[in-house]
Every structure is written in structure tokens, then in C-alpha cells.
Amino acid sequence: MVSSMLKRKSLNERVFDAYAQKRRLAVPLVGFPGCDLLGMSIKVAQQNHGVHYDCIDALVNQLRPDAAFMMMDLSVEANALGLQVRFPIHESSTVEYHPVRKVEDLDKFRSINILHDSRIQSYIKTVEMMRMGLPDDVLVGAYIIGPVTLAGLLEGAEQAAMDSVIDPDKLETLCRFSTHIIQEYTRALINAGADLLCILEPTAVILGPSQFERFSTAYVRHIIENYKYAGVDTIYHICGNTMHLIEAMSRSGVAAISLDSPQTGVDMVKAAQLAGPDVVVMGNVNPTAVMKEGTPEQVRTACRSLLEQMREIPNFILSTGCDLPPGVPLENMLAFMQTAREFN
């Protein structure tokens, strides 16, 4: 199955068309609250593609966002390589052991075909079901890990940060290997029907601009080049204060950059200026302090304030600063969507 974006407008075209019609696209990064709606655990959803899809479908039926993503999970590719992963019942899975100490340690991973992994297949099948089951006007989004972040899971994030300075050739080797793994998964997700691919690169926030260009952007650009004719758009997402990386992120060839909440130091207006007019900026309502802990009226106030700030900026999508955690009230998510739909 090939992506329906072959027959659809690009993300950028949709954003500018909406702006011309005096409205905004609204794409909250939401997955885990779907487990709350159905009374399912996150562990079951992340290991059972039918339950996973049902949770996303329930959210889409309630919210009708412009795009829907599968659940965010930074352990999928690492788990497929055999890394030790912890699976809490009501939280997302996490990698607990980082086995690579030297470059030669990668040799034992090179022969692994991650597409034979059951969890990888579960996520691919979830995207297939989203493609077939969600409304045609809702773009199907999938997450993939970023090269620096997978390298950080292989050797530890702190070690990756040190290697970026004291042993850059080692980190380069890990990022090159990680890119190969990511590309295998990426192709499968595109074939399953993904319209959007969101690259999750949280570990890269520790890098300076030149290091980020070398260890993340260069490889993201390579990944995008690999499927540039598939009609799929790519989003760069990095948690935390990424103001020092905005220009480098925007030069990578992605269609959009997804930015964290203002409490981390992100200024969306300035970010849009740094990104330039051809790259969409997404964000950045606080997923915890506002969406989970706030009242519906506080959600509406935060959304209206952000929409007003970005009123004159066409290349903007209203979104959340990161994936919504479990426990976000449905009333708050509905307030988010209603405010976006009513804003003119």
C-alpha cells in the first residue's frame, strides 16, 4: 500500500490553503489519552496493533484533528535491535541498558533485520489500519526516532554528548548505523500508508548548532532524500528549548518543525522568523501544565493567545508542545480543537 499523499496536497499546501481561508490547521500530538477513552493500558496498546488503532480511532472520532499520529514510542527501533526495554503498564516503554562501549560493539547488530521484530510489525500494522479506517481528510502520521537519539540509546545519551566533543568519529559511526536502521523502518511505514513522518530527536537538544548539523541534520537530510518521491512530508520534533537549532532544523529539508512549550524558552514568533516562510512551525501549547492540569477555559485562553501571536504568520499549525501524556481530560482536548476551529 502506498501513501495517499501521492494523490493529496502537501502539508505546506494545506497550511497555506487554510490560511487563505482564514482558518488554521489543528494537530494536537495525542495518542496516550486514547487509552483513557477505552480503558486500555498503554502497554497493551503498544503491543497490540488492533487496540492501538482503536485508541487512535476513538480520539479522531471525538476530536477530528487535521492529522492523527500513532502513539509516541522512542523504544521501538532500539527494542527491535534487542536492547533491554522496560514496559510499564500505564507509561510508554523505555530503554534501560545501553550496550555499545566501542564501535566494534555495533558488529553484533548489523545483521539484524528490524522488520522481523513483532513490535515493529505492530506499529506498521497500526499505520495500515489508520490508513484504511480513519476519515479521508485526516492525514496519517507515524513517528520514527532520530539518528542522534538512537545513537544515544545505543551508547547512552551522556556518552553521546561527550563523544560529540571528544570522539566525534565514534558518534558519526553510530549515527550512520542508526540512519540505516531508521531508513528500513521508514520505508515500511510509507508503504503502510503514512502521509507524515515525524522524526523524534530529543537527545539532539544537547548539541550546539554545528554539532547538530553534523550528527543529526546531515543524516535527516539523507533519510528524506531516500523517499523524496514518495509524496510524504517530514516533521522534525525536538523537546526542550531548541531556539539555537531552529535554523539548522529548517535547513534539513523537512516540511515542518514541531516545537516545545513556551515554558522551555521557545518563542514561536521568533522561531517562525528563523525558520523562514517555506517551513511550517508547529506548536506549542504546554502538554502538561495546560492540557493535563489546566481547565478547559485555561486551554482556550492558551490556544487563543498563541493563535493571536501567530495571526500574521501563514506557515503555522496549532499543536501541542509534545505528545500529550495519559490523563489529559477529554474536555481539554475538545476545548483545544474548538478554539482552533472557531478562530478566524
Image (cartoon, rainbow, N blue to C red):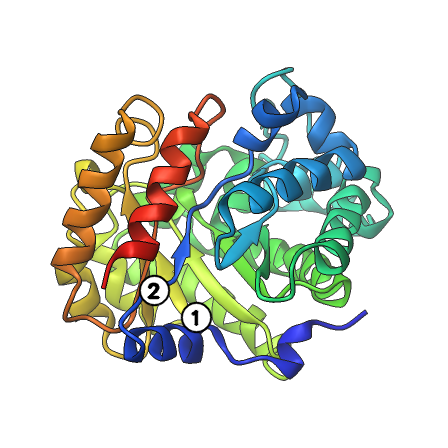
Count of marks overlaid on the render? 2
Q: Is disc 1 placed on a helix, strand or loop?
A: loop
Residue drawn at 18 percent across, 51 percent down: 306
Residue drawn at 13 percent across, 61 percent down: 270
Q: Is residue 73 above or below residue 238?
A: above
Instruction: Tell me whether the residue at label 1 lies in contact with that at label 2, contact meaning CB atoms closer than 8 angstroms.
Output: yes
Question: Which is more N-terminal, label 2 or label 1?
Answer: 2
List the single residue furthest toward the top. Answer: 89
- Residue 317 occupies which quadrant of the picture? bottom left
Q: Is residue 247 above or below residue 267?
A: below
The Cα atoms of the two marked residues, 1 and 2, are separated by 8 Å
Q: Give the quarter of the figure containing the N terminus.
A: bottom right
Q: Is disc 2 placed on a helix, strand or loop?
A: helix
Residue drawn at 36 percent across, 32 percent down: 332
List the single residue furthest toward the right. Answer: 116
- Residue 5 occupies which quadrant of the picture? bottom right
Left or right: where does residue 195 sit relative to residue 317? right
Q: Choose mark 1 or mark 2, whichever is in front.
A: 1
Label 1 crowd bin: few (<14), some (14–19), many (20+), radius 10 Å:
many
Q: Where residue 47 appears, x then y in whole percent?
A: 76, 31
Q: Where residue 255 appears, x then y in whole percent?
A: 42, 72
Is residue 260 something that shows in the picture?
no
Q: Where residue 173 appears, x then y in whole percent?
A: 56, 56
Left or right: where does residue 129 sit relative to residue 283? right
Residue drawn at 25 percent across, 73 percent down: 314
Q: Where residue 283 appears, x then y in whole percent?
A: 31, 51
Residue topped by disc 2? 249
The three-letter code of the residue at mark 2 reads: Met
Is residue 339 something that shows in the picture?
yes
Q: Nearer the viewer, residue 255 or 315?
A: 315
Question: Can you tell which mark lies on residue 254?
Answer: 1
